Image (cartoon, rainbow, N blue to C red):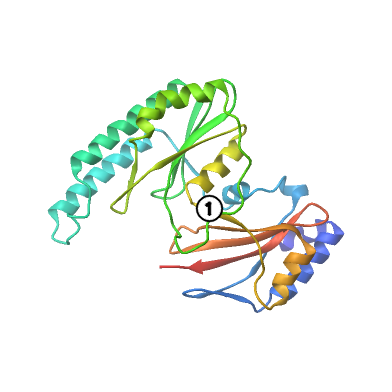
Amino acid sequence: MDLIKNELKLETKQLLATLEVVSEGLWYSSESYYPYTPFLWDSQSQGEFSIVRVLEHLGYFQDVEPEWLNKYWQSQIQEAKYRRQSDFGFAPKYPKIDEIQQMSERSSHFVQIFQENTLLIQVIKISASQILIIGQTQEEDWVGISPIVDYRVWYPRTTVYPEMDTPTAATISLKLKLEPLLSELKILNAYHWHDLVWENAPTKEKLLLKLLISSKYIEIRDFVGLGQNNLGSFLLTKLQNVLTYTFSDRTSGFSIYIIGKTPENDFLGVHTTSIQT
């Protein structure tokens, strides 16, 4: 952030300086304490803001080959064998090997149909259980699936959603072909089967956002304040459309970004971490 301060628009630069003052010494309390760190998205140098671009910038998206899914299922089969041969008491909780094998075959069939009916297919791995399978149809809209993995049952649900998109004929046709598999296909993680969600969108970025919300990986809520401190007041009075974004930080906690738009169309806010084990 210090490297680009001199290149910022004057009002954004002034707001950032004030934000650094009002956030100093404030901590987010959960099972540990983390500071509120100023966050800046300079639209001039970084382009249009979106939380998807923030996740990409942070390195959350890992592209893997579609064949990776076969390796994933084989690893689940090996894990099941190990659990059932061990004396650790996991066997009764873990799915049977033939159930995992059956789901692996459904997954392979799904990918095959998906590949045959899209111009390209992309598999994005965010975590061991968060996998996005997306593709672009011949009408150039985007379709995809993701497992529903509810990381934070103790938080309020998302209150901010993207607008609905009308599916093209190509999207409708592909979904009809996949529906028999979609109704039965699940992803295994931590002894549990997770259902899948299907989304479509006119752009790849919007599709990723819709999948991350529908799968409950990310929550987006209207920001209502932080209690009696100057930081909350600053964010609500100096910025527009302030939202709170919460998502898994790939360890034992969650990243929280509170971000709003400046008068000069940059995006400013704070970042902190919540530990929930």
Looking at the rendering, which quadrant does residue 72 occupy? Answer: top left
- Please tell me which residue lies in front, 151 or 57: 151
In this rendering, is residue 248 above or below 97? below
Q: Quadrant of the N terminus?
A: bottom right
In this rendering, is residue 265 above or below 206? below
Whole-percent x, y for residue 112 in the image: 38, 25
Q: Left or right? Give the position of 196 relative to 224.
A: left
In this rendering, is residue 112 above or below 190? above
Q: Which residue is drawn at 54% across and 61% down?
A: 255
Q: Left or right? Give the position of 70 relative to 247.
A: left
Q: In which quarter of the image is the C terminus?
A: bottom left
In this rendering, is residue 136 above or below 21? above
Which residue position holds label 1?
218
Whole-percent x, y for residue 15 in the image: 80, 65
Looking at the rendering, which quadrant does residue 37 occupy? Answer: bottom right
**Residue 19 in sight:** yes
**Residue 133 in sight:** no
Residue at the far right: name it. Answer: 10
Q: Left or right? Give the position of 6 relative to 95.
A: right
Q: Badge 1 local density, few (<14 within 10 Å), some, or many (20+)?
A: many
Whole-percent x, y for residue 257 in the image: 61, 61
Q: Which residue is drawn at 22% across and 40% down?
A: 99
Q: Residue at x 43, y 54 (%)?
A: 150
Q: How many marks?
A: 1
User: Please, what secondary structure does the residue beneath circle 1 have?
Assistant: strand
Q: Left or right? Give the position of 184 relative to 154.
A: left
Whole-percent x, y for residue 134 in the image: 49, 34
Task: Give amino acid for label 1.
Answer: Ile
